[in-house]
Image: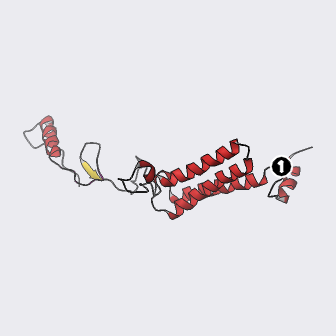
Amino acid sequence: MQADTTPPEGQSAGQGARQGAEEDADIEVRDPISAPDAEGRPRRTTRRFPLFTRDTARPEGGGRAAPGDAPAPARQWPILTVLGAVAVGLLLTALDVFRYGTMLIGAALVAGAVLRWLVRDVGMLAVRSRFTDIVTYGVLGAVIVLLSMMAQPDPWLEIPFLKDTLHFTVDS
């Protein structure tokens, strides 16, 4: 519902604006998800997309993964789990255990996709929509695991048609 902003007869526009500001100051915002609009009047925010997007909606599952009174690390356990596994994988890779380190990094991304699928509120692990996050984490994790299994020397996985493809694409 839009308020009438024209001043009553006999009143200047400046006086009408001051009176409107005084009336707005009397409005108490009780709803914790209310936010002021451009004029400072409280309005209820929704996750519905407007006709013309002016802001980005928070991703699904982007809330806290634990209650607000929990300590900060506990609220963000999904992303900390994935980042911890990636850190251990990077450490293994730096310690010259390349294959296991990179497999752990890929497995951590796949675990992030599984967490994004199963856990409702995953905190900062939610970047985009649930579908996009699952596909992105899953595909990147699977590709990293497959590439680490195909790494030389002594690959654990050999895909025969890749060698033939290489012969057709690279001239001798």
Residue projecting furthest to the bottom? 118
Q: Tell me if 73 is positioned left or right of 37 in this view.
A: right
23 versus 60 height, above or below: above
Question: How far across and how far down the image is residue 132, in percent?
Answer: 55, 56
**Which residue is pictured at 62% across the width and 48% down the height?**
88
Secondary structure beneath label 1? loop
| Residue sitting nearer the eye, 26 or 90 | 90
Q: Tell me if 68 is positioned left or right of 99 in this view.
A: left
**Which residue is pictured at 66% across the width and 53% down the height?**
104
Question: How far across and how far down the image is residue 154, in percent?
Answer: 84, 52
| Residue sitting nearer the eye, 72 or 59 | 72
**Which range of residues does the magenta coloring cover?**
28-36
**Which residue is pictured at 29% across the width and 46% down the height?**
37
Q: Tell me if 148 is positioned left or right of 79 in this view.
A: right
Q: In the rendered structure, which amino acid carries the disc numbered 1? A: Pro
Question: Residue tagged by mark 1?
Answer: 153
Q: Quadrant of the C terminus?
A: top right
